[in-house]
Amino acid sequence: MENIDKLISQLALDSQIHTNDIPKIDLYVDQVIQLFETSFQDTKRFSDDKILTKTMINNYAKGKLFYPVQQKKYTPEHIMLISLIYQMKSTLSINDVKKVLEQVNDKAQSRELDLSAFYETYLTLQQDNHAAFREELERQAIAVEGAHGEWDGELSRVLFIASLVHKSNLYRRTAEKLADELVREQADGKNTH
């Protein structure tokens, strides 16, 4: 089984846009793309993968995944929202991401939400997730090795991959279920007003 420390280091779990990485001035789209490329460079599976493109950002804007920009400039709050979208879109559909972030967008735009504090809390939760992930990955590797130690490395690796995919699917389905519940609660709240 592959060395867990080596595997985790290759995952670049600490790649993130922290609030202090975000310039205090508004950015044009090319600058936003460069910030994401720089911040998430180590997370690419293939070197020519694109982290974020103008088309993606334009589609997010047209789809109202974040509140409108002014004069083609993205505020630090927009960058935080785009970062949340970037993280969520790998698991949830764009439609689900829009629904999940709808209240965050509305409250951030009307200044009812300190988006910076919300985003910092998200980053703290991410750090907690990294520690739990490391422990779980180590536990899973030991379980695979212990379950069928007589199988060669390739078969053990297939078991490990299949087990990780299953766990990923459980988390994705849970996130989808929670997104559906959030949407129902939002709809119920709108219907009672």
Image (cartoon, helix red, strand yellow):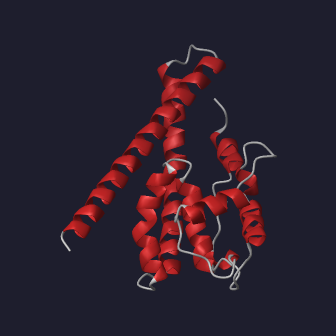
- The answer to whether residue 43 is seen in the rendering is yes
Identify the image quadrant of the C terminus: bottom left
Determine which quarter of the picture holds residue 187: bottom left
* Residue 4 vertical position relative to residue 81 in the rendered view, above or below: above
Q: Residue furthest right?
A: 48
Task: List x then y, in percent, for residue 45.
Answer: 72, 43
Q: Can residue 52 be seen in this snapshot?
A: no
> Residue drawn 37% across and 54% down?
179
Occupied quadrant, residue 184: bottom left
Residue 41 drawn at (x, y percent): 76, 56
Q: Could you say where residue 19 lies in the image, as x and y percent from the top left?
A: 62, 76
Apparent side of residue 186 relative to residue 26 in the rendered image (left or right): left
* Camera-side residue of 171 and 4: 171
Residue drawn at the location 44% of the way across and 84% of the way down:
110
Q: Residue at x 59, y 74 (%)?
A: 78
Q: Position of residue 63 (x, y in %)?
A: 53, 61
Residue at left offset 50%, top offset 56%: 129
